[in-house]
Structure formats: structure tokens, C-alpha cells
Image (cartoon, coloured by chain):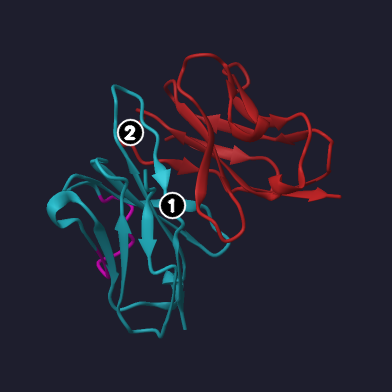
Chain colours: A cyan, B red
Amino acid sequence: EAGVTQFPSHSVIEKGQTVTLRCDPISGHDNLYWYRRVMGKEIKFLLHFVKESKQDESGMPNNRFLAERTGGTYSTLKVQPAELEDSGVYFCASSQVRGVQETQYFGPGTRLLVL
Amino acid sequence: AQSVTQLDSHVSVSEGTPVLLRCNYSSSYSPSLFWYVQHPNKGLQLLLKYTSAATLVKGINGFEAEFKKSETSFHLTKPSAHMSDAAEYFCVVSGPDTGRRALTFGSGTRLQVQP
């Protein structure tokens, strides 16, 4: 079974440009999460999809970030325009909840550097 | 609100000696607790999880953790360190405190293993 995949693995852009990150969850997983780790900080939650619906977007830092999950499969996270403080590692995770048990499986992350 | 505190940002051990990575949590309810590991340039991998069954949880690669409610701790241990254990380890909590399923991460402990 393929794991969570993310693309690209690395992205270097200039301040003010737009970047789109993609996440493909494990097949059959309805839950998809985005997290990020900015330099020197903890990994922080951004948002949670259940299928194509945003269940919780309380962690999104501002309106420069737009996440979509059309069709309930893969998800994209767009940053427009990018700022220096957006640099960090963006992780995607997916899960399938069974009763009260849930384990989130993470992708390798996208390392974003904004210059 | 729930939180986790990893008491050591860096731990250095010699190969073949025991590993102890400390984690304390704060949660109003019975939480789910996890340890994830991130090897250099890799994604986050689940080591083990506690979900209110046995208090001693065994994970992959010889790691285990013990849930101690009276001490609000979930320390990670391994009897004998291997060079391949060098990585960053994250203690993670989730739970029904806020009705959200987002994970809350500790700040991470970087484990060095000396030959």
C-alpha cells in the first residue's frame, strides 16, 4: 500500500510569488490534514478535511493560504503571495477513523524556502 | 487546552546504552498519545501510540513507552541504542478536549548516538 505522498519535495521561491503544494493521501482515507513546521518551532496544525469538506481550518495563519480538496482525493495548499515567514516544512497526513481509534500517517513533507 | 512538553531538546547516548526521552502532557480528558520519529530528510514515522488500553506500549524498532497518569508522563525508552536511532523524536497528543482531531506536537528531542 502506497503511503502519503507530497509534491514537490523542495521549493525555493521569491517573496511575493505563488507556490502550490500537493498531497496525495493513502487510498481510502477520508481524513486529510496539513501541518507545518517553521524554523525552530513546533509542528503546528493548519487544517483538516473530511473528504472534500473543511472540517477545521482554525490553524490557517491568514488568508494568503488556500487549501482545497476537490473530489475528496488529493489536496493542494496554495500560498499567495508567499512571505519570508512562510518558509518551513509542510506536512500532510491522512487517516481513516475506526471507532475512536485514529492514527495519522504522514508524508515526507515539502520544504519551502521563501527568499 | 491540551499540550505536551518534551523536557530535553537534545539527548546524546553511546551505542548500546539505554535511551530515555521524556515527555509530559496536559489534558483534561484521557488523551491519545503518540511518539513519532523523523530521520534526516525523511517524513514523520509513527513509533507507537497509547489509546487507553495497556499502559505499557510497545512500538517499532525496540522502543516502548509507559503512560503514567499520576505523573502525566509518557516517556519513551529503548534498552540499547543503535546508530540508526539517531533522529528527532516527537511526543504528540490528541484528544477530545476541544472536539478537534488535530495533533498537538511537542517541540522535539534530537537524539544523537555516539559510536
Could you tell me how far apart the alpha carbons at marks 2 and 1 are, in whole angstroms?
16 Å
Magenta span: A57-66
Q: Toward the viewer: B34 or B99? A: B34
Along the viewing direction, whichever of A29 and B49 lies nearer the viewer: A29
Q: Is residue A104 visible from the viewing direction of this image?
A: yes
- Residue wearing tag 1: A44
Using the rendered view, name the quadrant where residue B2 is placed. top left
Q: Quadrant of residue B58?
A: top right
In the rendered structure, does residue A63 fall within the stretch colored magenta? Answer: yes
- Name the residue at the front extreme: A1
**Outermost residue to the top:** B54
Placement of the N terminus of chain A among the 4 image quadrants: top left
Height in image: B44 above or below B75? below
Task: Kindly identify the residue that appears in the image at 45 percent across and 25 percent down.
Answer: B31
Pinpoint the chain carrying mark 1. Answer: A
**SS of the residue under disc 1:** strand
Which residue was labeled with disc 2?
A: B98
User: Which class describes the residues within 10 Å of circle 1: few (<14), some (14-19), or many (20+)?
Assistant: many
Q: Mark 2 or 1, which is nearer the eye?
A: 1
Q: Label 2 crowding class (10 Å Cα cut-off): few <14, some 14-19, many 20+? A: few
Could one spot residue B27 in this view of the protein?
A: no
Q: Secondary structure at mark 2?
A: loop
